[in-house]
């Protein structure tokens, strides 16, 4: 039979308010009474109405998530980390994508002003002034993912892109490569800029020049990786190794190499960044930077829930940077790698 909160209160011999406090684990209720209420609710498979609960508690039990894309494997792993934590906390997730800066502002304004979410997780690596303005005015808790470092006054979780890029370029140098090219990420993207900075610094620290002819623009897509490799390998002076700023561009570079009969790593070594599942299926296995993508999403979600419940101060800045490690494959010239990960 269907049962409501009034019937649970009648059967337990308590007030409706006591039932509400027991079911929501909110307020002082004797443990004996709480267990009696929970037993009745479980017996009749009672599920609180989230809309009615929202009207009484001014909470929706829903978390908003805004990501640049929803189709890339990288973003799907972030969603998985967020959703797993939301499920454990009996929360719902509302996901939206933002394909351009205007869309980011519109989506952010809608989420924050509609009252449909208790908090928000936002990834906008190309954050501009309008988004920052909304961030300052917002009264709802917000956690940023992979934000620019000049937003340290906010709550942010990000990957140490610089460290990962520096390490993988030094790994190439350790193989003896001197002419190392790069397929960059999109201009103005914080992740891409940090990876480019790590690439340049690794070369300079090892007394190797940063050669502009070995650097081509990309946009984190397989298509740009394809054309990036074709451009680099069609010029008179060719690189010995190429650092693709993410794995999707490395996948595109593999396809270009196959079509042009370019052998990896004999003719050119290729390395990537992210360690997405697809990179493990390439032949030879792609050497790349391992990024704890799922952990990035789960950490952000756990902290946001603490902000919502008041366990931490939502107005206090907090920044956590996750380390990246190297995953060895045959694409750089390694032989006995066996999917070894070095941190």
Image: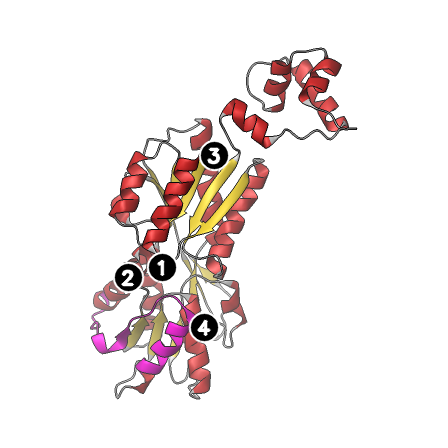
Q: Which residue is mark 3?
A: 305
Instruction: Answer with mark 4 or mark 1, whichever residue precedes in sequence.
Output: 1
Highlighted magenta segment, given as a residue range: 205-232
Q: Which residue is mark 2?
A: 198
How far apart in space, not on screen, are marks 3 and 4 (Cα)? 36 Å
Nearest to the observer: residue 341 or residue 293: 293
Q: Which residue is mark 1?
A: 164
Instruction: Answer with mark 2 or mark 3, whichever residue precedes in sequence.
Output: 2
In this picture, residue 127 sits left or right of residue 289: left
Instruction: Answer with mark 2 or mark 1, whichever residue precedes in sequence.
Output: 1
Nearest to the observer: residue 322 or residue 175: 322
How far apart in space, not on screen, are marks 1 and 3 (Cα)? 29 Å
Q: Which residue is mark 4?
A: 251
Q: Are marks 4 and 2 in contact (CB under 8 Å)?
A: no
The image position of residue 165, as x and y in percent, is 33, 62
The image position of residue 160, as x and y in percent, is 35, 53
Residue at x 51% of width, y 37% of height = 62
Q: Residues within 10 Å of mark 2 (few under 14, many from 20)?
A: many
The image position of residue 258, as x and y in percent, is 46, 84
Instruction: Answer with mark 1 or mark 3, whichever residue precedes in sequence.
Output: 1
């Amino acid at each position: 039979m269907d049962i409501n909160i009034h019937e649970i209160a009648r059967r337990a011999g308590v007030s409706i308010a006591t039932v509400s406090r027991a079911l929501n684990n909110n307020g002082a209720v004797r443990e004996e009474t709480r267990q009696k209420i929970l037993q009745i609710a479980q017996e009749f498979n009672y599920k609180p109405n989230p809309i009615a609960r929202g009207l009484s508690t001014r909470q929706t039990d829903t978390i908003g998530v805004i990501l640049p894309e929803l189709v890339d494997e990288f973003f799907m792993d972030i969603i998985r980390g967020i959703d797993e934590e939301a499920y454990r906390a009996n929360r719902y997730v509302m996901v939206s994508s933002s394909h351009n800066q205007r869309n980011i502002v519109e989506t952010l304004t809608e989420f924050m002003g509609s009252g449909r979410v208790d908090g928000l997780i936002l990834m906008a690596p190309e954050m501009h002034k309008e988004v920052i303005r909304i961030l300052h005015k917002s009264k709802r808790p917000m956690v940023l993912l992979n934000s620019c470092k000049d937003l340290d006054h906010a709550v942010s979780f990000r990957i140490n892109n610089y460290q990962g890029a520096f390490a993988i370029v030094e790994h190439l140098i350790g193989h003896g490569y001197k002419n190392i090219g790069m397929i960059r990420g999109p201009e103005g993207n914080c992740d891409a800029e940090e990876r480019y900075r790590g690439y340049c610094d690794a070369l300079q620290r090892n007394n190797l020049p940063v050669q502009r002819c070995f650097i081509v623009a990309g946009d984190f897509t397989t298509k740009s990786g394809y054309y990036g490799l074709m451009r680099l390998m069609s010029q008179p002076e060719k690189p010995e190794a190429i650092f693709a700023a993410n794995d999707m561009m490395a996948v595109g570079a593999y396809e270009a190499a196959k079509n042009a009969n370019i052998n990896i790593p004999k003719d050119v070594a290729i390395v990537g960044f992210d360690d997405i599942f697809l990179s493990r299926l390439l032949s030879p296995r792609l050497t790349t930077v391992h990024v704890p993508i799922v952990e990035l999403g789960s950490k952000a979600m756990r902290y946001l829930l603490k902000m919502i419940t008041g366990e931490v101060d939502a107005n206090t800045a907090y920044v956590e940077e996750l380390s990246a490690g190297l995953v060895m494959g045959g694409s750089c010239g390694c032989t006995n790698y066996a999917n070894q990960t070095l941190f």
